[in-house]
Each structure stands twice: as structure tokens, then as C-alpha cells.
Image (cartoon, rainbow, N blue to C red):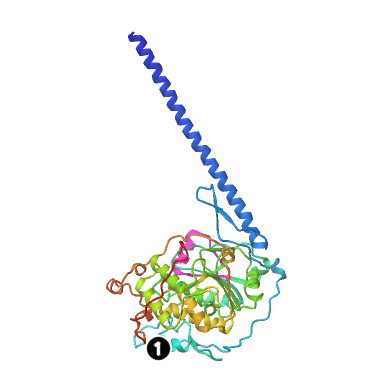
Amino acid sequence: MARRSKGGGDAAAAAKAVWRRGAVRLVLVSAIAWALLVLLALAFNLWSSSVSFLSALCKSDSKVLYAPDPMGLSSKPLHRCSIPVADDPDAVVIPKRTPNAIVKKLPYITVDKQDKGTPPLFGGRQNWKQREESFKLNATMKVHCGFMKNSGADMDDVDVEYIKKCKFVVASGIFDGYDIPHQPSNISLRSQKLFCFLMVVDEVSLDFIENNITVKVDSAGGKWVGIWRLITIHRLPFDEPRRNGKVPKILTHRLFPQAWYSIWIDGKMELMVDPLLILERYLWRGKYTFAVAVHKHHRSIYEEGDAIKRRKRYARPLVDLQMKIYYHEGMEPWEANKRMPSDVPEGAVLIREHTTIADLFSCLWFNEVNLFTPRDQLSFGYVLHRLGDALRFFMFPNCEYNSLFILHRHTREHSSKVEWAKTIDEIVKKGLKESRGGLGLWTPYPADLSSVELPTVKRTSQAG
């Protein structure tokens, strides 16, 4: 009996071992099969999305692009739609430049009137009276527009010489090493010859780029990453990287004064449409001088301000103060009967002909960013409101905006301590106040704002 019991135990143990090995193999095979199915689904969705996207760039009857979810098993819209661009960049006829009708001459204030021993500020010390006067249109105007003498934002001589030839510009910028240059796609030979592709970087970003990707140096000493000519800015004008990035973005006409036309794209973007086709679609076809997309979620600057506070994109009390000033000065919340489809743009792509009125708009927009918060989507609609119908302006559908580029992630996320501040006392006690920008937020306003109550904000989007 003892022998039979031992033999039975051995048999049971052997059977259990076989079962365990079989179970492990089954789990492994199932996991591999599942992984293969996921990869196949991802590959199919990515392939089909690529085909749809390329079709969307060229055909008026193309479908909305769909992309896989993280598991690759279902799809969701990416808010892209077809762009009614011309068929051939080589066939695009470049029109004569728009004549300067309202503002004919626009010199700039270039000397900052500061106290003795105080260094000049890049944006100048614009007072409230000068700010108000700058919105009154005349044939000849003289306004603040950054670039005060000896205030920073200096370029190397080799770059100053290179940009003199640039009449058509695609510009972008990278500050504080947050991105690397992404090469544009679908660029015709004509556009490669016609356009200067200028990537503005600070010294930190230049070092990061040189340490991570190939940078070629030409015989004149110019630095290149693919089609992009790197333009290095020395002596940054602001403490905040976000505020420094507004210089090439908004003051493109000041940084590249020979430019007739410019297309700005943020540094994290990969341009997917030929720039000549962009100018034809968004400027020349409708005889506009400035084009930007409608914001995906928000129409009112007060809704945008609320979203900035909730997402901790800048100090809450300072955002509120800027909004109170605008509301006091007559900026009403957006309504459907307004002349523009939105007061809030998608500011990552700006398309401009550099007429004097378009340049004036850029100067006034920058002055607001310099005086108040660096969140330029707040001040954009205000400046447009103050200038009225003077600017030939086009706000195009957001779905077309999303078809112009591929969006890449930042190499790292930006955050500064001032963005998390909840009270003025916290900003002051913790030393979070900027020393070279946003000074209008700390300069007594010439009216009592204590009784100003901001309009109630209704969230129109869960994503906002």
C-alpha cells in the first residue's frame, strides 16, 4: 500500500508539473498573440491615418482624419479637415504687395527713458497715456515695439547679414531647450529657393541642439539643421522663457525687417504644407494681410483667462487684473453677433503680410504682452477690438489649422513658480515678481478697478 501511495504521488506531481508548464506556455502564447494583434491594429490605423492626412492636404473632398487610441483598438477624430489649397506651388502667382492705406509711416520708439543707472528695458517703459495714444490711428504713428537700444536680443553679425536677403520667411523659435527643430515636409523646390526658414534659438537651446542632433556650419559661419537656419539670440530680454519666445513670434517684422511675408509656427510643430500654398490660401485669395486660426475651445478672452487660471499657466491674481483692465476699457465677452468668429486665436501659427497696419497690430499686441501676462491669447482679441476694421484680418477654421502641421511633444515641460501663485502677497513674499516684463501689472492703473466684476464664465468645453 505504501509503494502504491508513493507511486501515485509521483504521478500526481508529474501531472501537476506538466500542467504548470502548459499553463505558463499558454499565458505566454496568449500574451504574444495579443501584442501582435495590438501592433497590427496600430500599424493599420497609422497607415490609414497617414493616407487620410496626405489626402486632406491636397483634396477638397478628403475625410476627417482619425487616429488610434493608446490601445490601437478604436479611433477618434483629430479635428483635422481638408485645406482648399491650390494644386501646384509652381502655378501660384505672387501678387503685388498691399498698399499702405491707413497708417503710411510707422517709426518706432527706440530709446527707453529710464532712471540714471537703471538698464534699459527691451519693451521700454511705456506709460498708460502712451498706451492709450498708440491705439489712435493716424497716417504717421510712432509707437513702442520692443528692441530698445542696448536692451538685448542681439544677433551674430553673420546672421544679421544673412537675413538681409529674406523677403519670404518661415520662422520658428526654441527657448530654454524645450524642443528640437522638426524638418518641414512637402516643400516644393520653388519654396525652398524663395523662403528663408529661420529657427530663432537662445544659447541654452543652441547647446542642447548641438549636443543632440547634427548641426552643419557653412563657409560663412552660419549654422544649419536641415532646411532651418539657426539664428541665435544673445542677452535675452526677459526672465521668463515664455516671454522671450514672444519676441520672434510677435515681432517677426522687427527681427527680420526685410521680410515682406512671414509664417510663424511654434517650435514643437512640423510644417506639412508648402508655404506658398499657405500664403495663397490664407492671404492672397481673400486679400488679407493677417491670418490666424480660431481657438479650438474658447471664443471669449474671459473664458480663456479662466482656463489659464485653472491650468495654472500664470498667477491667478495677475490674470484677473489684466482681465479687469480689459473689461473696464470696454472689452465685452464674445458673442455670435461679433464681426470676428472668435476673440481667442490658436496662436501657434501666424500668417502675415508685413504692411504698416499689420506691423502696428504686432507692435500693440507685443506691448500688451510686455505690460501684462505673457499669455498672448488674452491680449490678441483686445488689440483686434481696439483697431476695429483697420486690419484685413482672416480667422480660419480650427480644423484647417490642425491640418497644417504635426504636433510633437516638448523635450520637457515648462513651469515657473509664478504660474502657481494664488495671491499677490505670495508673489511678493516669495520673490516671484518678474523684473523685466509684466510691469504694467505692478504700476498703478489710472482708474479704480476695485468695483469691476468680471463677467461670469460658462465653460463650453470639457477640454478647456
Q: Quadrant of residue 229?
A: bottom right
Residue 433 left/right relative to 147: left
Name the residue beneath numbered marker 1. Answer: 113
What residue type is disc 1 on?
Lys
Quadrant, the C terminus:
bottom left
Element assignment for label 1: loop
Residue 352 in sight = no
Residue 47 at x, y percent in the picture: 61, 51
Q: Which residues are magenta?
A: 197-222
Q: Quadrant of residue 57?
A: bottom right
Say above or below: 285 vs 100. Answer: above
Residue 309 at x, y percent in the picture: 39, 68
Residue 261 left/right relative to 131: right
Residue furthest right in the image: 91
Please count the marks in the image.
1
Is 164 one of the magenta-colored residues? no
Is 205 one of the magenta-colored residues? yes
Q: How many other residues sit within 10 Å of disc 1, few (<14), some (14-19) or many (≥20)? A: some
